[in-house]
Image (cartoon, helix red, strand yellow):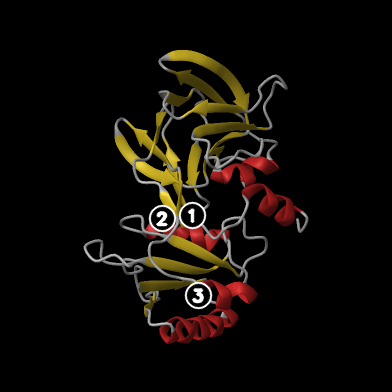
Amino acid sequence: MNILIVNRYGDPHVDSFSCELENLLQSYGHFTVTYKENLLGDAPPLFDSARPPDLVIVIGGDGTILLTTQQMPVQVPLIGINYGEVGFLADIEPEDVTSFVSQLKKPLQLEARMRIELRINGKNIGTALNEALIVTDRPAKMLKFLIHINGKVAERFRADGLIISTPTGSTAYAMSAGGPIVDPRVEGFLMVPLAPFMLSNRPHLIDSSRTVSITLEATKPAKLVIDGQTEMHLETNCTIELSKSPSPALFIDAGQNFFEKINRKLRHL
């Protein structure tokens, strides 16, 4: 198999572990390449979309995994080795790598994870695997949101911000803001207001087949942050349209039960 290894940047322990992993993979007959960031300019493409690897192995935490999916020109099978704090997205612990590699072969058992495409005036402005966050540029200022579902006004509220999460991202920022944990096999948009002015403004889980749009009615400056990796300024009264991406993230099924993993990981928070 052709395997690309992506390391968390700037961690000598990860670099050392990565060398050991390369040697282990090669001993089982796999061809490996390690992604190198260009410190003198823009990062090079993760890989050539015309010749994608069979598998990407990410060594790091959830942030490194999210950044990797953002940088993929096309989505290919991915698995994370946890070198972060909790690692909700990383299914392999460092001590389990030898066992994983010994069983690694085609066909790969995959689990598709829904991603959310965001558009303004029909233009794609980003794709989120975890969440998109809308917040004011000015601390302690509230934003006004107008939500349309299938062309009908569903809710109008004021809040410090709004989290638009996938089921995968429900265990991240959305959970910290009071949202529910959602089975990743559910395909929907989870919307969680941040510190809403009215306590009646509760999280909503909306089926991904519905047409959903979010309009900023406030004149205050705001920004959009996608997966904690990229951010952009939002114009006054802009409308963001949501849709399920036709290109889901592809995670290797490492035999982890989602609910057991969440229970285990949450004990370390």
Q: CA distance from mark 3 to mark 2?
A: 25 Å
Instruction: Find disc 2 in the rendering and name its residue.
Output: 70
Provide the residue designation for mark 3.
Answer: 101
Residue drawn at the location 29% of the way across and 37% of the way down: 123
Q: Residue at x 45, y 12 (%)?
A: 152
Secondary structure state at the residue bearing disc 1:
loop
Which residue position is annotated with label 1?
229
100, 80: nearer the viewer: 100
Which percent across, then down, holds residue 96?
61, 73
The amino acid on which the numbered mark 3 sits, given as a three-letter code, is: Val
Judge by depth and name the residue closer to the eye, 31 or 67: 31
Q: Nearer the viewer, residue 78 or 61?
A: 78
Q: Are marks 2 and 1 in contact (CB under 8 Å)?
A: yes
Q: Residues within 10 Å of mark 3 (few under 14, many from 20)?
A: some
Q: Amino acid at mark 2?
A: Gln
* Quadrant assignment, res 232: top left
